[in-house]
Image: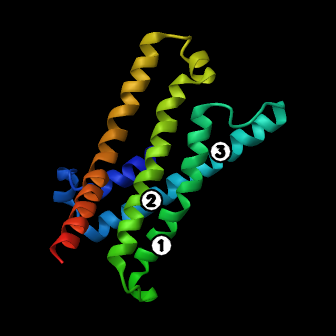
Amino acid sequence: MLLMTEGLLSINKYNTFWRQKTKGSFRVKVHFVTISGGYLLSTIGSAIVYINKEKLGKSHYQSWHALFGLIALISAIPPLINGLALWYNKELAIKKPKLVKFVHVLSGTSSFTFGALSLLLSVYTKWYKRKSNNSEFVFYLGFITLSFPVLWAIYGPSVKLFRVIKSYFSEEKAD
């Protein structure tokens, strides 16, 4: 999730320091590599947890953390495919790249939101309680530390989606 957050922040319009120091094509490459790497590591991590639970005879996907994580993994497939289509836009001769980009941003933001919810819910798991010695301070520290970067990463695409949807409906009324 850390890499996926970095991937979103790499193209975030509100990340002004990064935007001043880099070019757009480089930011897109960083976005592509970090999101792809994050998805790969998330898939491997989920497989490891699944195999470990299978060996221990424990049930799977019983917590909200696990369910939202599974939803995030599955729902990340369409934005990954859309991202690849946008990456090879010219080679694929896509007629409406703006529509593909809109679907990419919409599906990617919703998938990231599920992943973010899973990440935030991880502080409610039995594993986290055991590792933090059931400390209330560590619980709040973990929750707050995870909340701010994730919310900041979601903010940029959410504003963009709102503006695109708003402009779409205002153009329709003008006709």
Q: The residue under label 2 is which amino acid type?
A: Ser
The residue carrying mark 1 is: 84
Question: Circle 2 — which element?
Answer: helix
Left or right placement of residue 72 versus residue 150 in this view: right
Q: In which quadrant will I find the C terminus? A: bottom left
Residue 142 lies, in percent from the top left, at 43, 24
- Residue 23 visible in this rendered orientation of the protein: no
Query: Residue, x 57% and y 34% (percent of image)?
Result: 65
Q: The residue under label 1 is which amino acid type?
A: Leu
Residue 30 lies, in percent from the top left, at 37, 61
Q: Earlier in the sequence, mark 3 or mark 1?
A: 3
- Residue 29 sits above or below residue 108 on the image: below
Residue 97 lies, in percent from the top left, at 35, 78
The residue carrying mark 2 is: 107
The residue carrying mark 3 is: 46
Q: Please report contact status of discs 3 and 2: CB closer than 8 Å, yes or no.
A: no
Left or right placement of residue 75 versus residue 108 in this view: right
Q: Please report contact status of discs 2 and 1: CB closer than 8 Å, yes or no.
A: no
